[in-house]
Image: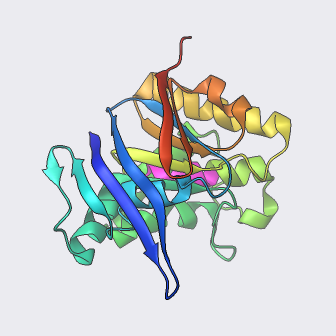
Amino acid sequence: MIRLEHVNKYYKTDEESLHVLNEINLHIKKGEFVAIMGPSGSGKSTLINLIGFIDRKFEGAYLFEGESLVESNDAKLSAIRNRSVGFVFQNFSLIANNTVYENVELPLLYNGYSFSQTKERVSTVLAKVGLADKAEKHPKQLSGGQQQRVAIARALVNEPKFIIADEPTGALDTVTSVEIMELFQELNQQEGVTIILVTHNPEMIDYCSRLIEIRDGTVIQDKELVK
């Protein structure tokens, strides 16, 4: 589904050119649960911005479902991103004044659905993440784990091709982190959701089927994880 070939990324300043991604070659297949792991400054955030169609200024090739995206303009990439990627962030990124239902509904409205078309899909994904009874609550009325479940529901509602989860348990306690990772694992194994997990926490790797380790902008390890 995702293929990067000889990808290099530079950040240029007046003083110097920083080589932040160095000859990245990798592919991610539909249905995988991939961990991208590395310390701060390793290049993993730059890599997922590229994979998630946020950053298109790089050298090399990016093929998504066999189509090269190198020449795509911002409008095309934005359209692909809206229909193909779900994002889950460490800080949940929910809208405080919106209800749980409204937070999850928002991506559908961005994609042109009318209010009358959204109810069934929003209700379905809220049930999937165990929040069917929280639709009318506001984020501040929920625990951190419940807020992250709302964020996961929001990421799922457009039925994306893949989900990027960027340090999704970074703001959660240990018990809640396990619950969230088990939810991701369930979505991957039972529903075939493709997940790219970004983490610096080795305990999260146990839930994944593959580990890509990046350091100083270079992939230093790419291996299947034996279960």
- Which residue is depicted at the point 30% across and 46% down? 4
Q: Position of residue 184 (x, y in %)?
A: 57, 35
Q: Position of residue 203 (x, y in %)?
A: 73, 30
Q: Position of residue 52 (x, y in %)?
A: 39, 57
Question: Which quadrant of the rendered structure holds the N terminus?
Answer: top left
Question: Front-most of 185 and 156?
Answer: 185
- Which residue is depicted at the point 57% across and 61% down? 101
Tell me which corner region of the image, top left, top right, bottom left or bottom right, holds residue 141: bottom right
Q: Is residue 117 visible?
A: no
Tell me which corner region of the image, top left, top right, bottom left or bottom right, holds residue 81: bottom left
- Which residue is depicted at the point 29% across and 49% down? 6
Answer above or below: position of 185 versus 18: above
- Which residue is depicted at the point 70% across and 61% down? 91
Q: Position of residue 129 (x, y in %)?
A: 59, 40
Answer above or below: position of 218 versus 83: above
Return the residue found at the far bottom: 14
In the figure, is residue 207 to the left or right of 118?
right
In the figure, is residue 205 to the left or right of 53?
right
Question: Which quadrant of the rendered structure holds the C terminus?
Answer: top right
Return the residue found at the far top: 227
In the figure, is residue 119 to the left or right of 186?
left
Q: Which residues are magenta?
A: 150-157
Question: Front-most of 180 and 120?
Answer: 180
Q: Is residue 92 visible?
A: yes
- Per the picture, the main secondary structure of the magenta-coloured stretch is helix
In the figure, is residue 16 to the left or right of 70?
right
